[in-house]
Amino acid sequence: MTEKVRSKIDISLPQSATAGDVWAQFRGVERITMELTQSYKYSLGKVSRFFMELENGRFLATRCAGCGKVYAPPRPLCPNCLAVADWVELSGQGVVKTHSVLHFSPGSNDDVEALETPYVLAYVLLDGADTLFPHLLKATPDQVHSGLRVRVAYSEKPVHHPIHLMYFVPVVERERQ
């Protein structure tokens, strides 16, 4: 007889019922494979300009009009003094403060699914910013260390989410001069 459930992994039945086990008739377990997908529309809201400018090869942050703190990633409102922020362009260069090497991709979208493991997630303090920007650093794990100078590079290929239009790369010696 052919399997009627193509996703079936296995069925496990109890060896024997214990006297007084009121759940005995529910102890048989069938395991199946399920794939869940979800599609929805999402607004990038007040920081949409950041993503739109990535398409133009520009890296924007926000500067608090009250205290002057610069946020990258951008924030429309300063959490310190609650003043509305203004857009500023940064050079896209900075320094790695810390990093993590990932040996597993969560596969949250096609861009992430396509990453070859291991890959590096770096926390970068961009020149002119006061906050760390966590993002992909395209470098081998043995190249990466705290203090490494990096710059933003832009993808030439179409991406699923606009945050993947940019990534960090190490600054080569001749770029520093």
Image: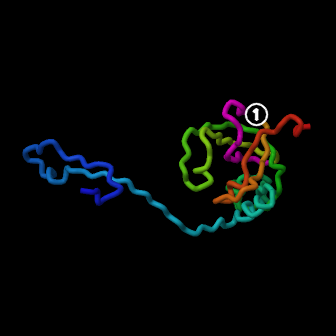
Give the quadrant of the C terminus.
top right
**Residue 142 percent location from the top left of the image:** 68, 30
**Res 34 → quadrant:** bottom left
Horizontal side of residue 79 vs 11, given as left or right? right
Q: Is residue 31 left or right of residue 111?
A: left
Residue type (three-letter) at the residue carrying disc 1: Gly
Q: Residue at x 48, y 61 (%)?
A: 37
**SS under mark 1:** loop
Q: Name the outermost residue toward the left.
A: 19
Residue annotated with mark 1: 147
User: For residue 118: magenta?
Assistant: no
Compare residues 95 and 62 and report the one nearer the observer: 95
Residue 58 figure quarter: bottom right
Question: Would residue 134 be counted in the magenta stretch?
Answer: yes
- The quarter of the rendered structure image containing the N terminus is bottom left
Residue found 89% across the figure and 36% down from its top: 174
Q: Is residue 93 left or right of residue 101?
A: right
State the residue in front, 65 or 9: 9
Rendered view: 91 above or below 103: below
Tell me: residue 83, above or below residue 170: below
Image location of residue 21, percent across then percent down: 12, 48
Q: Residue furthest front?
A: 1
Q: Nearer the viewer, residue 67 or 8?
A: 8
Colour scheme shown: rainbow
* Of 114 and 144, the residue lying toward us: 114
Q: Residue at x 68, y 56 (%)?
A: 163
What is the span of residues highlighted in magenta in the rendered image?
A: 129-148
Looking at the picture, how far across and down is residue 46, in whole percent? 69, 66
Task: Answer yes or no: is residue 84 visible.
Answer: no
Q: Residues within 10 Å of mark 1 (few under 14, many from 20)?
A: few
Above or below for 13 versus 158: above
The reply to whether residue 64 is visible in this rendering is: yes
